[in-house]
Image: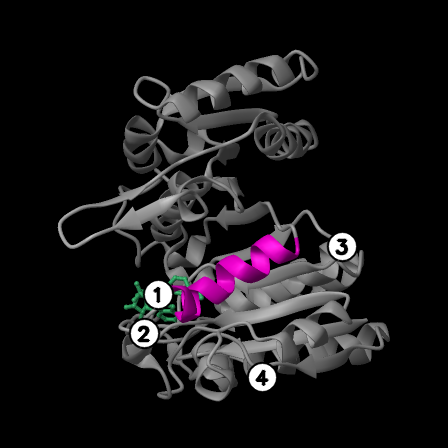
Amino acid sequence: MKIAVLKGDGIGPEIVEAAQVVLNKVDEKFNLGIEYAEALFGGAAYDVYGNPYPEESQKIVEQCDAILLGAVGAPKYDTIEPADLRPEKGLLAIRKSLGLYCNIRPIKYYDFLADRVIWKKGLLDGLDIVICRELTGGAYFGKRGHDENSAYDTISYSRPEIERIVRDAFEMAKNRDRKILHSIDKANVLDSSRLWRKVVNEIAVEYPEVELHHLYVDNAAMQLIVNPTQFDVIVTENMFGDILSDESAALGGSLGMLPSASLGGKISLFEPSHGSAPDIAGKNIANPIATILSAAMLLRFSAKNEAAARAIEDAVNAVLADNIKTPDLADETSKVVGTMEMAQEIAARI
Ligand code: NAD
């Protein structure tokens, strides 16, 4: 199992190194034969090669079975021109070049966060949502342009692009206990959404066991707050998924808890859902759990080793149940630990 390690910028190196401590422990226990190949990515790659995803890094990635990514971006890169060389464009390039059209973000509620979240008691009991976000189409990849006084971006989707992600989402819903799928669009206004809804309805015929609902994105944003446990699997286009998954992160207590997997190509990519958090970079206070749970997803989806994935998830639960927390999760009763210490506590429970 060869893993490309792209640490990136800001807290990226800290959280990836923390995840490697846990991966190394699982490797030892389950004899996985993990090897790492490190490559520069994002601002760190721009500093050396003038490109956020240079050929040198592409070559390393292409020889690996899976990718573990930290995060990219920092204020000093926000003014790079042309904008296509900014770190975030490296993310779009790697997703597109590897055909990673399906981004999965599981959001679970943890009992021990009850006092940390702002919701009415009981509202989140049993919360278990998977967001299935289209990742290589829509506004982030559409035609764009600007002059001094105007600018435009376009949302464009083809039928095959919609079909493949929607089919994945139906499959996912079919294999879960509740078998509910919410498709989220803006079909009352956008042509691209009308095609989206049409295709969803066509594919729904193949999945009679799945209970399908359509929601407009504005309503979905509200429903996630007022009645989040109605959701099981959510499928939506790129930009709506980007926004709704960050909103949903609040349901899980912290952005630092939300892992993700990007699938669809030969090599899959695993990364936390949050960004590079420049405000806390280098302070050893970032929560590494989203990255550690992303490493668990790597073992589940790329290594096909469910037991190893579960071992990590159980160890995360055990540490949190012991009230050992990073500052973003802690209250006055917690033992507060730093990024690396959290990883060591998790590794010790595997
Ligand atoms: P962010 O996710 O980096 O941070 C938002 C807030 O959450 C900050 O207060 C941060 O301190 C906190 N936070 C994030 N991750 C945390 C963690 N693991 N532990 C504790 N707290 C955490 O979003 P932002 O501030 O909007 O963006 C910062 C940079 O990240 C920008 O350059 C942006 O473009 C980039 N970004 C990158 C990705 C990615 O690499 N996939 C995703 C989103 C944003």
Mark with earlier residue (1, 4): 1
> With respect to residue 209, does 52 lie above or below?
below
Mark with earlier residue (2, 4): 2
Principal secondary structure, stretch drawn in magenta: helix
Amino acid at pointer 4: Gln
Q: Is residue 221 left or right of residue 257?
A: left
Observer able to see residue 321: no
Question: 10 Å neighbourhood of mark 3: few (<14), some, or many (≥20)?
Answer: few
Spatial CA distance of label 2 from label 4 is 37 Å
Residue 215 placement (x, y as % from top left): 39, 22
Spatial CA distance of label 3 from label 1 is 29 Å
**Residue at the spot 79% in from the left edge and 61% down from the top edge:** 303
CB under 8 Å between discs 1 and 4: no
Spatial CA distance of label 2 from label 3 is 32 Å
Query: Quarter containing ligand 1?
Result: bottom left
Magenta range is 84-98
Give the residue at mark 3.
266
Question: 10 Å neighbourhood of mark 2: few (<14), some, or many (≥20)?
Answer: few
Q: Secondary structure at mark 4?
A: helix
Q: Secondary structure at mark 1?
A: helix
**Residue at the spot 71% in from the left edge and 51% down from the top edge:** 265
| Magenta-drawn stretch contains 96 | yes
Give the residue at mark 2.
80
Give the residue at mark 1.
83
Q: Secondary structure at mark 3?
A: loop
Amino acid at pointer 2: Ile
Spatial CA distance of label 1 from label 4 is 39 Å
CB under 8 Å between discs 1 and 2: yes
Observer able to see residue 233: yes
Residue 344, numbered circle: 4
